[in-house]
Image: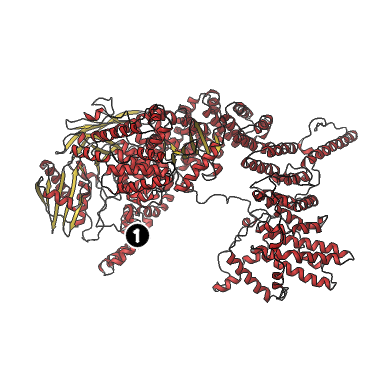
Amino acid sequence: MIKAILIFNNHGKPRLSKFYEHYNEDTEQQIIRETFHLVSKRDENVCNFLEGGMLIGGSDYKLIYRHYATLYFVFCVDSSESELGILDLIQVKVFVETLDKCFENVCELDLIFHVDKVHNILAEMVMGGMVLETNMNEIITQVDAQNKMEKSEAGIAGAPARAVSAVKNMNLPEMPRNINIGDISIKVPNLPSFK
Amino acid sequence: MALKIVKGSIDRMFDKNLQDLVRGIRNHKEDEAKYISTCIDEIKQELKQDNIAVKANAVCKLTYLQMLGYDVSWAAFNIVEVMSSSKFTYKRIGYLAASQCFHESTDVIMLTTNQIRKDLSSPNQYDTGVALTGLSCFVTPDLARDLANDIMTLMSHTKPYIRKKAVLIMYKVFLKYPESLRPAFPRLKEKLEDPDPGVQSAAVNVICELARRNPKNYLSLAPLFFKLMTSSTNNWVLIKIIKLFGALTPLEPRLGKKLIEPLTNLIHSTSAMSLLYECVNTVIAVLISLSSGMPNHSASIQLCVQKLRILIEDSDQNLKYLGLLAMSKILKTHPKSVQSHKDLILQCLDDKDESIRLRALDLLYGMVSKKNLMEIVKKLMLHVDKAEGTTYRDELLTKIIDICSQSNYQYITNFEWYISILVELTRLEGTRHGHLIASQMLDVAIRVRAIRVFAVAQMATLLDNAHLLTGNMQRMGICEVLYAAAWICGEFSEHLENPMQTLEAMLRPKVATLPGHIQAVYVQNAAKLFATVLKNQEGNTDSTAAQETSQLMIDRLPLFVQSANLEVQERASCILQLVKYIQKLQQKDVEVAEEVCALFAGELNPVAPKAQKKVPVPEGLDLDAWINEPPSESESEDEQPKAIFAKEEPKHSRPRHTEVDEKELARRREARKQEQANNPFYIKASPSSQKAYQEAPGVEHIPVVQIDLSVPLKVPGLPMSDQYVKLEEERRQKERADKKKKEKKKRKEKRSGRGRKHDSGPESEEDITPAHMVDIVTEEMPENALPSDDDDKDPNDPHKALDIDLDKPLADSEKLPVRAHRAAEAPKSPAEDGEAENAASQEPKKKSSKEKREKKKDKDRDRKKSKEEKKKKKHKHEEKGEDLLGGQADEPVVQSEETNEVAALPTSTSAEVSDLDFWLSNAPVPSNTQEAATVAEAAPVPEAASGTAPDSEPEEPKDTEMEETKSSKHKKKKQKKEKEEKEKKKKKKHHHHHHHSDGGGEESVQNGTVEEEEPLPPMSNYCLLAENSYIKMMMEDADEVYDIQGNLQDGSQVVVSVIFENKCDSFLKSMEFNVLDSLNSKLQRPEGSGPHDGLTVPFQLPPGVSNEARFVFTVQSIVMPQKLKGTLTFIVKNEDSSTHEKLDFKLHFTCTSYLITTPCYSDAFAKLLESGDLKCSSVRLEGVIMPFHHLLARICFHHHFSVVERIDSCASMYSRSIQGHHVCLLVKTSGQTVSIDAKCDEPTLLGNVLDEIKQTFSQC
């Protein structure tokens, strides 16, 4: 079982937190802080496993993490998961690659502004702490189908809202940073729904 | 309309959305909290609006804030609102929010049951998917119970996307509602062979999770998994299965033998490191399980160790880590093969990666021997000095202690060395493990008699240098060591060289800064030392020395008497008075030493941990029973039995904080004082003494110098452990030399050249004799102590409840609770319900309980007539408090009633077990794994020669019984069907053969007496579709009707659930469901298939099993009822032959099936009637003899209406078609005549619906 999936940046700011067991908000924050503390002090090119922190089950649980540029992806798992399997799940086959496909060259800003989308992608991959799907194409198909549905539901009504949001994005000072990553909400105006 | 929507959305688009919120937070870095609190205020405003889009937006923002650590539970109800939106976009937002912040104690969760159920049965797969995902995060026992059956149905949904989610979530359901495991298990098992790899993987996942906790229940699945393992190519699934086998092999060594070969093949062939690693792991598990039985698997061990060495030597740190991890598993059973890689492991100790160093440490544990212990520990001590960061150093410390103390200090040859290692460890700064070192010191000093002299000397030095340990506040952890030091010096004070010096060290004012429990030990042991000192001094002629010692005590003890810690205070004042008395005696030149020593005389023997627990309670002794009648409250307080043991506390080898609260202590003290006062043998303190020491100069004035030492100093005067290493080395050499001499002598004497020992080679373990003849005192155990030690299991483990025998055939009673219809104004009486069930199951052995219940029922009726009726009802509700929740609350009761039955049923487990045995005893493992699989498959066939079917389905025996005689077959089948129906649809009585046509399948009301409170007869929408000697199809026509995309699309969808039941004793497979489409209605087929292709039913049917599948139809016009012709084709597979069979059926879509139960408020209903758009029609029913609420319930249930309002014998009802037609009914009853006035905007539809209603009641 996977107990939690955390994404935070190099400063420990949470970008996504998914706990498959209930903790109250304060404990969750403490766990994130503790995990960040454990993970961030590790050098690059040391191994990607470490024993869990005190708050999240102690040494029965393992933290399996990957560090990409500014982000840490941490999975907290128990002994029924294969360490290398989870590591592959984060990178080689699934999670990050899928994010990359869905956001087109994913970067931290995508996760900051679209945490809901990341949750939706994650939901197709892990459900209730168990791995649901490991096939990236299948995940992308399902995510796309749902996004399509969402767009068709928004229909006419959605278009102006998206236009405004695009305008808002353009006016913002941080936009220059945003431009090179191709903010997803700009390319949205969605012609099929106008038919 | 569209314009309005656009306008609304223009208003909305200037609302802050999630992106704006995030941006805002990033722009307000300085006053983030303030900004967020204004945002939360805005959100609260937005949540108050009616517009669901605004609400969803607000909830979406809340989800983000929740991640930042803000409590959003106050919005739980709004989240539920958003969840119940019909739009997928909002639904998804709602479910996401719920999954992030709902948990078992969220009270609004119980409001969601019906919403979730609706979403689960939605024809839109993503609605279902999103509901399943959400549910997996917040499922509660109630939800699990209420929805288990719905989810189980989804496990055979046509879409693999839903199937895999449904399968996976079952694990969560099992955890919360363990009763569901057995009924759901056959289907879960079936999913292991699902055509879709995703579903298969999910099923493997769930079973692996289950089996990991209770492996023995899943042994019978081993052949199936074996087959999967040899056939699957999905690494993820393979890893899971191989891990599962790792858990199973310890239980069944024969399984291990079978596994070794395919696993070895995999190890050689796979390129995936993850798979290779798991294979090695499982091979190790196999080897461990075999180690006792099979002597020779050295080839496999070699292979594993060799592969692991490759991993460890890899440059990838991850592989290195895992290699070491796996190596430590081999170590337990095959230490020799690991020990040859000692070089590699010691090398890993120097790795820069802490995780790897820790793993290497684990390995060291098993690699030590008498010979190399000192060397290894020396190396570790070097690491301790180098280590940065306390965690790793603490880990080193515990490892050193673990390594040395393992198996009763087996490897320690020189305890002086060990003590000095322990003393060296006290130099560690800021360690948390002071208590560990302390307990080791105590343990060694107590149990190794020969070492006491040395230990006491070391401890005395420690005490003397206590300031080094306590100087720095950071090092408080280590001061625990002083606890041990003080106790050892006190208890074994006869060995002290200079007890007086130690006594002075123990009474230094600085001691008062130590934690209370340590001070207490100091005081107590100061008294012991005092006794020793007195004894030594009284031997001399000069008595002044002794008196000076007493004076020292009297001077120093008041400091402790004033301690804030009660324990210290109490002991100090006791001892102070004692010393004062002694001083008096000394002044009279009385010899007191003997008597004082007697206070502390006697050897303390170590007691094994948990010794007390292990004493078996003698038969017939009830520890909870009162020996005497319980005394009054005040008396019992005085006689606290604990007080007797309290004094012994310091003798425990482990330091323990006394955590009794102060009041309690004060009270006990009071009690004891009283006791002491009454005790003639107790030496009383002079009443004035209390004042005396209070007048003594205050301690505050004594200057206390804090020595702050940030650099750990070597404790002066302590011998370094290294010296001992050298000494030991010399000693051993000498010994060896001696031995050689002896041996030579021996040889000279006897020329028997047995050559058992190589005298020139490295000495073997047994040759090293300990330096001292240590006599390791074994811990005392009570006589007849129980050897078992299994009190470590956590009683709260949720997996305990899942320890269920899955091979036992399912009892009829074991079905999942199914939703039944409940009319609002007719609550079911659970007692009567239970009776109905009981009567139906016709269990003679339950007669007595039945009788009882009958009486109860009579009573109930009496009550109803009496005036106390209401009161009683309330009482009843209390009994079944849960009834309000789901209407299934009576189910568990029924189940528990019938557990006897389950147990009593003759089980087929023996057959099952022998199947497994057969599979396992298939001794020569074929080299070709594929062949092995087929053998495994074929294996059970000869087993089944006795006449049962080859498959090991649990239903088997029932089935054969059923087919015994043809004459009774029919009858029995009917009974069986009845039973099944009952469980499927909440205790329903069904007259199947009356309803060969497609009418509603309800039965006539049996109870002639019409009473208002009478419970509703059970109802079902399932009706017989078609049956032949092979299969029976039951259809529930369009119970769930759903309109997918409203006005965007003209087509509407209807879901048809069909139960397939295998009635023959052969296996049914390749079932294809096909319908001849009409212009109006079409079966939805997967993309790419032609209009005449059939749909494959996503399961196979073993004999006697039934399963449910759902089919979606698209319907154009809904105003007329329709019939569709269809065919089911399937293959009947016998042991030796298989035949194609088919079954024709007619699907009947009534107009009713296009109606959706939609609640309506009375004001909206009135508006609707007033609008004048509706056409009117009416119908009269004659001769209806049933209570009015039954009538309404029937209309609600069979025709999907909901009651808007009910006044006496008149009710208004509402329903809506999938295409948005409103249907309103006004139902009136007088006597046996019921008149229904109806209005609808589509007259044809209305006419048909009324006809159907009429037909429903004409069948009664």
* Residue drawn where x is 57% and y is 50% of the image: B792
> Which is more toward the observer, B811 or B687?
B687
Q: How is the image coloured?
A: secondary structure
Residue B306 location, quadrant: top right
> Which is more toward the observer, B1217 or B469?
B469
Asked whether the viewer can see residue B1079, the reply is yes
Residue B284 location, quadrant: top right
Q: Is residue B1253 left or right of residue B703?
A: left
Q: Secondary structure at mark 1?
A: helix
Q: Quadrant of the N terminus of chain B?
A: top left
Compared with residue B229, is residue B1039 higher up or lower down, i.e. above or below?
below
Badge 1 crowding class, 10 Å Cα cut-off, few under 14, some 14 to 19, many 20 or more, is some
The residue singled out by tag 1 in the image is B850
The spot of residue B1095 in percent (x, y) is 28, 30
Q: Is residue B710 left or right of residue B173?
A: right
* Residue drawn where x is 89% and y is 66% of the image: B542
Q: Numbered disc 1: what chain? A: B
Asked whether the viewer can see residue B813, the reply is no
> Which is more toward the observer, B631 or B135?
B135
The spot of residue B500 in percent (x, y) is 81, 59
Identity of the amino acid at label 1?
A: Lys
Residue B1016 location, quadrant: bottom left
Total count of labels? 1
The spot of residue B745 in percent (x, y) is 90, 35
Q: Is residue B467 left or right of residue B1068?
A: right
Compared with residue A171, is residue B674 higher up or lower down, i.e. above or below?
below
The spot of residue B38 in percent (x, y) is 36, 47
